[in-house]
Image: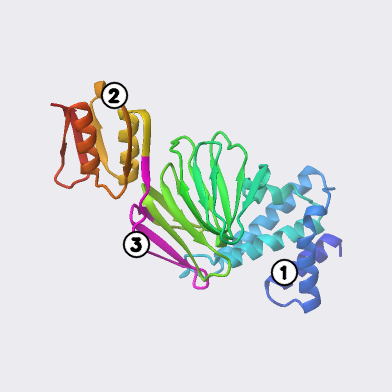
Amino acid sequence: MTKEEKAQLLLKKYLNQEASPEEVNQVEAWYASYEQRPASLNEGRKTQIGGEVFAALQLEMQSTGKSARVIRLHQVFQMAKIAAAIVVIAGLGMTFWMARKPQLVAEQLVSISTAKQEIKKIVLSDGSEIILSPSARLLYPAKFKANQRTIELAEGEAFFKIAHDERRPFTVKTAEGIYTKVLGTSFKISSYQANKSIQIAVATGKVAVGNSSQVFGTLVKGQQVVYDKKAQRATISYTPAPIYVNLVFERASLQQVIEKLQYSYDIQIHLATALGNLKCSATFNTKQTPEEILDLLCSLHHLQFKKSNDQKTFNVYKK
């Protein structure tokens, strides 16, 4: 029996919970050391073994039962770890594992931590702002890629005010494989390892929250999701205490102001093209209603607005 065949047999015993304590320790030790192993097989063999490991992973995921549509995260992660172990024993080194790892790993990350009773404000390369609460840790790239913006809240609580960029969605990853994806909005995430749940609350705009198996839902201003780590269940509700933020504009065009209001309040505002270049310097707060803000803007530029019956659509025009 070859070394590879022995490793595959041991992996099967491990997954079927038939391995002895010594064998369990051996498999987990292989996994722990995979990053130090050099690749030695030719590319054809790497592809073959990598495909076999991935197929085994998919099979295990599907075998959790037809009635259970949601795959438990710890099972998936455990399979990924052991798949990495068999790759190590076969001499694949990093090739297959790196292909499966999140893209965060390939980037040069900056790590920022806060001590007890310390708060830090971080401004990212795209202009997004993050307020990091005490005893928290954040990982982010010094410069974002051209097609995505991804960071990780490894521990603690933070408030995110994300710069809008339709070409590059912004994703925050947390423990338990939970992600929060936005284009440009503001929200708070609380993800402490010692806590039983993860909370995500939306201050302005709209965010999608989910994991590798499903999307829990799309949240709007005033909503929150609470993810129970043990039960692996997400509950969406309205925040018990609203989160308010300032909307600051310095010599911004009226078109830019309108776009920000649309994302902040999840509304539609129709503005005549000829009015889009009018300038505005002002600070609003999301405690104010869209009607209050539009009334101020229209007074500033001698305009008028009219709202639809559903309160979700507004038309701004000259008097």
Please, what secondary structure does the residue beneath circle 2 have? loop
Circle 3 sits in a helix, a strand or a loop, which is it?
A: loop
Which residue is label 1 attached to? 12
Task: Pick whichever, 307 or 280, lies toward us.
Answer: 280
Give the mark nearer the N terminus: 3 vs 1: 1
Where does the image place residue 91, in percent across and percent down from the top left? 82, 53
Residue flagged by tag 1: what amino acid is it? Lys
Residue occupying image coordinates x 72% and y 78%: 18
Q: Position of residue 7 (x, y in %)?
A: 80, 64
Foreground disc of the pair 3, 1 = 3
Tag on residue 278? 2
Q: Position of residue 124 (x, y in %)?
A: 55, 40
Q: Which mark is residue 241?
A: 3
- Residue at 72 percent across and 69 percent down: it is 12
The span shown in magenta is: 218-247
Looking at the rendered structure, the kind of residue marked 2 is Leu
**Amino acid, disc 3:** Ala
Q: Residue most toward the top?
A: 274
